[in-house]
Image: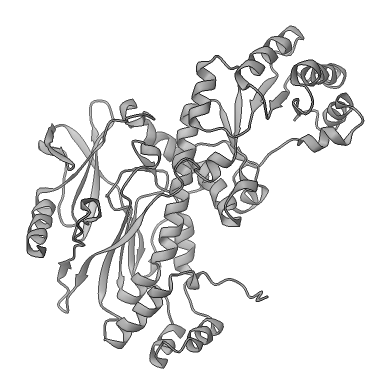
Amino acid sequence: MNERKLNLTMLCDYYELTMGNGYFDHGMADKITYFDVFYRRNPDNGGFAIAAGLEQIVDYIQNLHFDEEDIEYLRGRKMFSESFLEYLRDFRFTGDIWAVPEGTPIFPREPILTVRAPAIQAQLIETYVLLEINHQSLIATKANRICRAAEGRIVLEFGSRRAQGIDGAVTGARAAYLGGCAGTACAVSDTMYGVPAGGTMAHSWVQMFDSEYEAFKAYCETYPTNATLLVDTYNSLKSGIPNAIRAFNEVLRPLGITKCGIRFDSGDMAYLTRKARVMLDEAGWPECRITVSNALDERLITELLLQGAKIDSFGVGERLITAKSDPVFGGVYKLCAVEDDDGNIIPKIKISENVGKITNPGFKKVYRFFDRENGMAAADYICMRHETVDGTKPLEICDPDARWKRKVMEDFTAVELQVPIFKNGELVYKLPTLDEIKRRCAYEVSTLWPEVKRFDFPHQYYVDLSEELMALKDDMLRQGQ
């Protein structure tokens, strides 16, 4: 088995290497190109998604290089010129990147990240950039949906053992936290990213002891300030809750500790938690918190709360960490412009019989319009990079999928969504802490109208193209017919 350290530069699709070699052989290695990252459809037919994954992309870009082992591997494939392989020895990223900050609500077809770089560099980073944005944005979006369904109750990410690989568990926990979760069961995500890790017991703890009561008593003695007992190993109502109350009475009450918890991992959660709340309150434990887990998602959480379940926190595993109901984010990386020898930006477009796959050409930027009266997000506006919008003049916008749906924006604040990340290969962006990203996400989602945040049939948020961009696109479509 080859145990050499993984070089993420080689985490690319093979065609990026063959194209790079071709660009080099045809004198296009230094040709400046522009690529946009965007997605076409919101997960779960929701109203928006959450941008995530930028921090890992920054680390990747800063460490781009080819080891001797990588070059020898490529030489062994007998497809690459020696001059190209020599070029790879000193490979590094020298271009520019703009991106939407992590935690920002995003919408289909608008540029999340834009790359301006020499052709080989821009092409080579495609796979990793998409990998991080697609995975973490998907999990952050799912986490945000689940946390909104919980209506302010604590949601913990419990999915490591069901995640799709190591990175699925580790960065998945990171994305879930910035999307709204309070913590994770994944200890390494705490050591790497500062995602608060926690946990109590599994059913095996209860089974290890001669009786359920002894298991609960021992746990309370070892962790008196963090005693959350799993009460469904045998019979939740007949033994689990009574034994938990007995352990609380005998161990915690003499210490003056009133905060504790129980957890259900099976059964009818609505019925069991209502019964448990009554039993705990009557026994003098009103501060005992009730946690539930077991294949939860936003739909089931909503149903449980509608049924009057008495739940203080949720542990959500497989349906969050795999985004089980809609597990593909679908972000793409598309060429939108190149520069000629005089530095002029030449727009490029991809035309398809599938209308949804037609791209928006040119070097662009995105504005978000906020209503000055109430601070709510009203629309996004994709325009050419040189265009400016200040919000002092009325601006008519429309739904690009139904251009007869129009509204006039007045008295609004226009904020550019993308910020500079790299300039000439150097990092120019101060990476925020994970808690800062989490707070940003909570605030930015709060600026969306409730109709946009509905789980079912959300209002379609306006994402319009400027007149100049629309005219350019129409003209290029006519020329391409």
Vertical relation: 449 (above or below) 403: above
Q: Work out which quarter of the rendered image holds the C terminus and state it.
A: bottom left
Percent coordinates x, y for residue 162 in the rendering: 61, 47
At a point 77% along the width and 9% down the height, the residue shown is 283
From the viewer's perspective, tell me whether residue 394 is left or right of residue 376.
Answer: left
Quarter of the image holding residue 197? top right
Q: Is residue 145 left or right of residue 237?
A: left
Query: At x 50% / y 36%, what residue is drawn?
Result: 180
Please determine whether, in this image, residue 131 is positioned above or below residue 299.
Answer: below
User: In the rendered view, would you say 373 is above or below 135?
Assistant: above
Location of residue 190 in the rendering, given as x and y in whole percent from the top left corner: 63, 48
* Residue 155 location (% of width, % of height): 57, 32
Colour scheme used in the picture?
one colour
- In this orientation, does residue 151 appear? no
Q: Nearer the viewer, residue 474 or 63?
A: 474
Instruction: Answer with left or right where residue 414 lies relative to residue 455.
Output: left
The N terminus lies in which quarter of the figure?
bottom right
Q: Residue at x 59, y 49 (%)?
A: 163
- Residue 33 in the image: above or below residue 390: below
Whether residue 119 is visible, yes or no, is yes
Image position of 180 (left or right of 157) = left
- Residue 382 is situated, as x and y percent measured from the top left of the image, at 20, 49
> Between residues 362 and 459, which one lies in front from this camera angle?
459
Most extreme residue toward the right, as rendered?
Answer: 210
